[in-house]
Amino acid sequence: MTDTIKLTQYSHGGGCGCKIAPSVLAEMLAAMPKPPSYPNLLVGTESSDDAAVYKLNDQQAVVVTTDFFMPIVDDAQDFGRIAATNALSDVYAMGATPILALAVVGMPINKLPLQTIRDILAGGTAVCEAAGIPLAGGHSIDAPEPIYGLVGVGVGHPDHIKRNDRAQAGDVLILGKPLGIGVLSAALKKNELSAEGYRQMVDTATQLNKVGATLGALPAVHAMTDVTGFALLGHLLEICRGSRLAAEIDYAALPFLSVALQLAEQGYATGAADRNWNSYGAEVVLPPDFPEWQRKLLCDPQTSGGLLVACAADAVADVLAAFHAQGFAAACVIGSLRAGVSQVHVR
């Protein structure tokens, strides 16, 4: 981590914790006119999905998304890497493969040294290289707070696109990465995050969700999304609402970053965790006397989090094998879906 420039001091929030609260976003979009129908638009605004998908022909669909945020870490290259990894995740979450990216850059030019900005851009470029795609351009503005991200463009077979609203009753829920990045970011902002905690945070947030393209080709994978700013509960509720199902998750089965778990029990949490709960807590059923710190972990905003998969029960072994083969050691079954009111039941 750099000792001279602390990027987080220039922003009021960081990472996917910057996202507008789900309830506020819903209110903002409620009055939007319904767009006209386009037969080749396979995924648009109707399902709060990760990316837009447009069918080019019977063999190809183009997947387009954009994602950007303010610094979640102080190190410039790590910030660029995390932001770029997070943006490309939306393409993978649709079951597609990225083919190119454009940079979205807003920087306080009179506050940050040019070398710091170069390092942010270099971090994003490194992730695109790791994904095997060109960073082919972008757009920049002089902004009061540092902002970085990507427009991600991908391709996939129309039959392999995985929406977040096609889950089925009886599906098993599998999560690809451990939770707790928001807790670690809260400790970092207080200068109380250990070197091991920082390593866990960066290693997790910069792991590309490439496995999404593999999972897209599996017919028994019915729905997929990635867990980001709205936390596990929020993104699972999007699956439930869109698919008109209820979910049950086993808290004891959830994977957590070990340092985040320790810090959460000590009371570390982000303000976004409470905003998330206030937005969708009425749709969540918790056990009696469920600890407050555990509830906040379920609402912890993840920056560049893992893929959340709903698949047929007989495909669990194949899905886990795909995750594990591509380095997602923490991937595991966390619950299931059933017929019922669109709620999440935690046991």
Image (cartoon, rainbow, N blue to C red):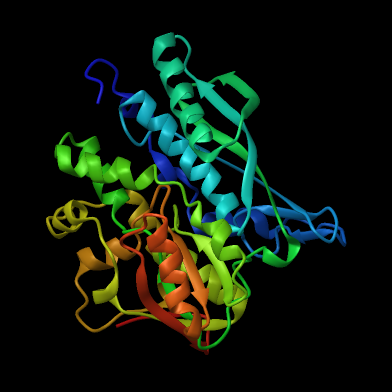
Task: Please provide percent x and percent y for residue 99.
Answer: 65, 41
Query: At 47% across and 52% down in the image, what residue appears?
Result: 209
Quadrant of the image for the N terminus?
A: top left
Q: Position of residue 331 (x, y in %)?
A: 36, 65
Residue 205 location, quadrant: top left
Is 177 or 220 nearer to us in this picture? Answer: 220
Q: Between residues 245 and 161, which one lies in front from this camera angle?
A: 161
Residue at (23% x, 39% y) in the render: 198
Above or below residue 219? Residue 72 is above
Would residue 143 appear left or right of 161 to someone viewing this image? left
Residue at 45% of width from left, 17% of height from top?
117
- Quadrant of the rendering where the C terminus is positioned: bottom left
Residue 7 position (above or below residue 19) = above
Q: Quadrant of residue 10?
A: top left
Q: Relative to the observer, which residue lies in front, 158 or 304?
A: 158
Task: Using the rendered image of the protein, determine whether residue 270 is visible from the camera's viewpoint.
Answer: no
* Left or right: 243 in relation to 16: right
- The reply to whether residue 42 is visible in this rendering is yes
Q: Position of residue 203 (x, y in %)?
A: 31, 43
Q: How many marks?
A: 0
Looking at the picture, how far across and down is residue 33, in whole percent? Answer: 79, 57
Q: What residue is at 53 percent from the left and 62 percent from the top?
A: 225
Q: In this image, 260 relative to 237: left or right?
A: left
